[in-house]
Image (cartoon, rainbow, N blue to C red):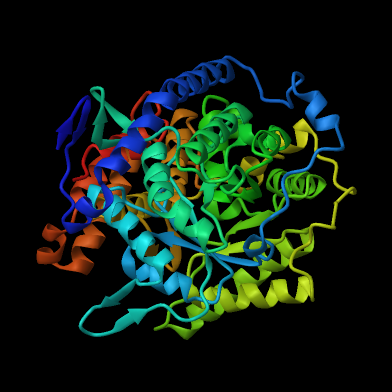
């Protein structure tokens, strides 16, 4: 298809004609032309700030927005009825089976994800939109020939996570440039489902990823106002929960809530991307080198400071605070693995509920029960913990940035290095196949955890980090470990399955994003060019 200044370059089967109608495309194009220049300016500002950090600048609470933080009167808009109780939220990609299972899971909310757990092939993105329309209309079903899937009477409330500001959608070109993936995902869902949701007594609800400043939240708010006007939807119908998953956003949580206050639905502690952000932003500074990923738990001081500040900030402004994702998942074929996973998830959710979080995330339907049980006990007859103001919490700049000698106390092991290589390669192989959430070694891996794996290796090599056995982490050692992991995978899969996989391409891509200079801001940027 080609109209004035607009080209649709992909083919996604029957769903494409249904989703990319002339009116829907026109709406996305309006959003692109109105807001992409500001998006590009904000991305340039990210790059400029990274240069300042590399030169020695450290983030701090903003002096120019002090008045917002010190004004105790303002609050975000009161949550609509179906967002008052968010004790358990399940997340996952937008494929048809996942959408049905998640809505039926017993969780209060389902975050349908176009971002970290979705491999953004053109077909996945377009068919995902069709799946969400059918979910909103309650007509979604699936017959695999082995099992039939359909919605139950009681289902979760739907929230949608578009891709982040840094990504584009190459298959829709506007004025010779690819459209913002954020505006594409948001615009199509709002166009097709915004009025449907409003008329049904709910609303179009969103999660906003990867924000680094309140100015990026302001851009989203401007988009919401513009889009609601264009579609004749009342202001405030859109509600958005912002993931605090970058170290820079942690210093601007109040300002982010303030910018979105008419449309705010709270903040979420996006722990894995937050850890990646710390590695990425301070990659040139040796004092920020982290040890093996499993040793950087939610109980280490800088992670505790971030999550407790999030709860305090949200509740002071009448906003929900949603906890993060425990990576452990059950294995229906291994009772011992399942028991360990449930115990670890219970422990994680008990800590969150005790801290005052109003709800939490899980990635698997079998974890809904344990998370709900923990939050049921904490909440009692209440829908949330908004009345817990956490005035006892005081978090300073030093608390957020001080890593407390984690590396010297915990260290980098060969096992940690090997795990990062194995997870990175296997996850990217899954992503290249079009699957963005992968169970690897009884953990749920997505783009965020893969980012940690490759960023840690880059960091260790860059700073000549020595492992606990005295060897230095070098590119040569990483490649040797990759050779060994590929050989093990070839042996376990068999030659035919190995050749049919994307493992060699994944290995090449992983080494590129883990070893090359300069550092790739996101591994999905070079990886995206390989997708159909």
Left or right of 309, for residue 394: right
Q: Is residue 319 above or below residue 35?
A: below
Query: Split into 4 quadrants, where in the image is the N terminus?
Result: top left
Task: Specify the farthest residue to the front.
Answer: 232
Q: Quadrant of residue 92?
A: bottom left
Residue 39, how many percent across, how many down?
Answer: 46, 25
Residue 12: x percent and y percent?
18, 52
Is residue 301 left or right of 151 when viewed as pictured?
A: right
Residue in the picture at 80% in, 34% down: 396
**Residue sitting farthest toward the right:** 392
In front here: 81 or 46? 81
Q: Is 314 on the left-hand or right-hand side of 227? A: right
Closer-to-camera residue (271/161): 161
Residue 164 is left or right of residue 274, and the answer is left
**Residue 415 visible within the image:** no
Q: Could you tell me residue 6's position as x and y percent?
A: 22, 30
- The tally of labels here is 0
- Tell me what residue is drawn at x 52 percent, y 24 percent: 284
Residue 379: image location, x then y, percent: 77, 71
Q: Is residue 382 above or below residue 6?
A: below
Q: Give the residue drawn at x 31%, y 36%.
A: 26
Q: What residue is at 25 percent from the left and 46 percent from the top?
A: 21
Most foreground residue, 359 or 126 = 126
* Picture quadrant where residue 9 is located: top left
On the question of residue 14 being in view, the answer is yes
Q: Quadrant of the C terminus?
A: top left
């Amino acid at each position: 298809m080609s109209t004035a200044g607009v080209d649709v370059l992909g083919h996604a089967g029957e769903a494409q004609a249904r989703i990319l109608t002339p009116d829907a495309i026109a709406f996305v194009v309006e959003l692109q032309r109105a807001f992409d220049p500001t998006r590009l300016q904000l991305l340039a500002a990210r790059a400029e700030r990274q240069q300042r950090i590399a030169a020695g600048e450290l983030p701090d609470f903003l002096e120019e927005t002090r008045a917002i933080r010190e004004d105790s009167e303002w609050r975000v808009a009161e949550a609509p009825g179906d967002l008052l109780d968010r004790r358990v939220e399940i997340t996952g990609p937008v494929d048809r089976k996942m959408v049905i299972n998640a809505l039926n899971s017993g969780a209060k909310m389902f975050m349908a994800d176009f971002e970290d757990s979705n491999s953004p092939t053109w077909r996945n993105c377009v068919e995902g939109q069709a799946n969400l329309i059918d979910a909103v209309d309650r007509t979604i079903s699936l017959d695999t020939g082995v099992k039939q899937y359909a919605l139950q009477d009681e289902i979760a409330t739907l929230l949608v996570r578009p891709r982040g500001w840094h990504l584009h959608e190459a298959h829709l070109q506007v004025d010779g440039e690819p459209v913002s993936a954020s505006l594409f995902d948001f615009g199509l869902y709002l166009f097709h489902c915004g009025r449907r949701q409003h008329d049904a007594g709910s609303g179009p609800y969103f999660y906003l990823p990867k924000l680094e400043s309140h100015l990026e939240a302001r851009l989203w708010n401007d988009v919401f106002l513009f889009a609601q006007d264009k579609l004749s939807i009342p202001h405030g119908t859109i509600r958005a929960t912002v993931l605090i998953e970058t170290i820079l956003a942690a210093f601007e949580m109040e300002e982010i809530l303030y910018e979105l206050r008419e449309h705010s639905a709270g903040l979420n502690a996006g722990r894995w991307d937050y850890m990646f952000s710390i590695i990425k932003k301070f990659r040139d500074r040796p004092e920020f080198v982290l040890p093996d990923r499993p040793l950087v738990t939610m109980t280490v001081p800088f992670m505790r400071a971030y999550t407790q500040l999030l709860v305090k900030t949200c509740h002071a402004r009448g906003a929900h605070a949603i906890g993060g994702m425990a990576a452990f998942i059950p294995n229906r074929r291994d009772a011992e693995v399942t028991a360990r996973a449930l115990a670890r998830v219970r422990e994680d959710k008990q800590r969150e509920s005790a801290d005052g979080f109003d709800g939490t995330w899980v990635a698997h339907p079998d974890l809904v029960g344990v998370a709900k049980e923990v939050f049921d006990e904490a909440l009692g007859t209440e829908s949330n913990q908004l009345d817990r103001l956490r005035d006892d919490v005081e978090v300073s700049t030093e608390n957020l940035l001080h890593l407390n000698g984690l590396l010297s106390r915990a260290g980098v092991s060969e096992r940690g290095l090997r795990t990062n290589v194995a997870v990175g390669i296997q996850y990217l192989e899954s992503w290249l196949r079009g699957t963005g959430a992968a169970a690897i070694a009884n953990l749920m891996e997505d783009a965020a955890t893969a980012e940690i794996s490759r960023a840690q290796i880059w960091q260790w090599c860059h700073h000549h980090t020595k492992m606990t056995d005295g060897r230095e982490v070098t590119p040569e050692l990483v490649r040797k470990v990759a050779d060994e992991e590929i050989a093990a995978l070839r042996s376990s899969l068999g030659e035919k399955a190995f050749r049919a996989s994307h493992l060699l391409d994944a290995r090449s891509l992983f080494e590129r994003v883990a070893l090359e200079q300069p550092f790739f801001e996101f591994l999905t940027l070079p990886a995206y060019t390989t997708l159909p």
